[in-house]
Amino acid sequence: MKIYVPMDSAAKALGADDVAAAIIAEAASRGLEIELIRNGTRGMIWLEPLVEIDRGAGREGYGPVTPADVPALLDGTLKGLGKVEEIPFFARQTRLTFARCGVTDPLDLEDYQAHGGLAGLRRAAGLKAAEIVEEVTRSGLRGRGGAGFPTGIKWNTVRQAEADQKYIVCNADEGDSGTFADRMIMEGDPFCLIEGMAIAGLGVGATKGYVYLRSEYPDAIRVMQEAVRIARANGVLGADVLGSGRAFDMEIRSGAGAYVCGEETSLLNSLEGKRGVVRAKPPLPALEGFLGKPTVVNNVISLATVPVIFEKGAQHYADFGLGRSRGTIPVQIAGNVKHGGLFETGFGMPLGELVLDIAGGTASGRPVKAVQVGGPLGAYMPLEKFDTPFGYEEFDGAGGLIGHAGIVVFDDSADMLQMARFAMEFCAVESCGKCTPCRIGAVRGVETIDRIAAGDPGAIPLLTDLCETMTDGSLCALGGFTPYPVMSALTHFPDDFATAKEAAE
């Protein structure tokens, strides 16, 4: 009997380690032979700890499981969830990037290969650099970190650059509220990220890679470090990648956790041991990046998606999606929501279907008021915008942004003036201080919103003008995108701002 208990951080926070220990102890007391496997999470967080048992006829799910449930679990009398793949939230997904997450033992390289791992790298190793980049370009893959920039164009710029050394840098500084896809991959399928980085290295001529991982992810750091060691020991990394005669190796580096280090130039400064502040562009990192050398900087999900593109072909991946948004997007559902977790689907699903149908509405049972999409810099989408399809251009046209595809749900008790204030306060706290519109503008923004709350309607035009200045004048997206949540709150929920005035009167 195989028993799977997630070692994902979310599952552990909900008691997975205690459940695993109870299973081992109970099985030992009964003289029962079991194989306990610590897998990644399937992404259905409301069911964690989600225990799966394979008695030879497929994996049956049970959850959330507590240590007290273990005797009944082993007796076969605990009420189950049925086949995990048939749970509606899971069954409606299109799992490409996350196909192995929650299925395999994260640090078992043989298990990884048995589920399609390294097939993409083996294929890429037989291609020329230009052919590798062309395959990524044809897939339509765009940056999943927020900007949505075409990955193939970035790779080709680095490939064509002349330099004695090039680098692949993975941006794993996942700091947006309501996001956890990067962590899920690194903890649940780390070889997938390693394989994607190796393919990128072969494609652009880079022989060295770095994963910049935030220090708040100790489990991900531990798993990634061990996965790199295993990959190196088995010839996946090193001077002769899978016998191809081409070199690529990588290291894991942890940052101190500054939100602005999610911006690529701040990240590069931090990686070089400097203060994490934004660099002016040009030069672009693709030409003068890490240590002044041509550098590919991609998000975890962008790089972890590369192996499936090479395993199944660019066209297979491009067949999913909507418009210029090709492939799948891992939507991370959080906040006041009944079914929180990760839902991977092809671009194009309307926001309302994700929130009201897939996620089941609010956990409080109250009506949904707003959904913030894209982290703390994302716009608050009202019910009137719920028909917006998940796509980069489609969200842009609706006054929003997808960002890292985290969605945070709020019910009708939320005060949108206070949410707008929080956005400005967040920017003020997290600003690197490099540019005036962000450094000073966010502080003035908090003060201006406080004036509105105190009953000064004349401060509203001032807030609008301030947001325009921050959008047009900030060096990076931190100051430039903070107006998205502020102005969307003001525009779509004016009653919350009027109520503040009335209350003051």
Image (tube, rainbow, N blue to C red):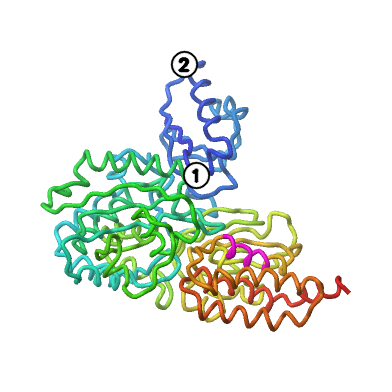
Residue annotated with mark 1: 83
Q: What element carries label 2?
A: loop
Mark 1 closeness class: few <14, some 14–19, many ≥20 residues within 10 Å: some
Q: Residue at x 29, y 70 (%)?
A: 152
**x and y percent of residue 188 in the render?**
41, 45
Horizontal arrangement in the rendering, residue 293 relative to residue 501 (left or right): left
Q: Nearer the viewer, mark 2 or mark 1?
A: 2
Taking depth in this image into account, of 89 and 382 the one nearest to the observer is 382
Report the residue marked by disc 2: 31
Could you say which is closer to the camera, residue 413 or residue 21?
A: 413
Q: Tell me the magenta residue range.
A: 420-429
Picture coordinates of residue 89 (x, y %)?
Answer: 54, 55
Residue 421 falls inside the magenta stretch:
yes
What residue sits 23% from the left and 49% below the top? 249
213 relative position to 409: left or right:
left
Amino acid carrying mark 1 in the image? Lys
| CA neighbours of label 2 inside 10 A, class few (<14), some (14 to 19), many (20+) | few
Vertical order, 79 against 86 (above or below):
above
- Residue 43, image x, y percentages: 50, 50
User: Which amino acid, by three-letter code, is at mark 2?
Assistant: Gly
**Which quadrant of the rendered structure holds the N terminus?**
top left
Q: Is the magenta stretch mostly helix, strand or loop?
A: helix
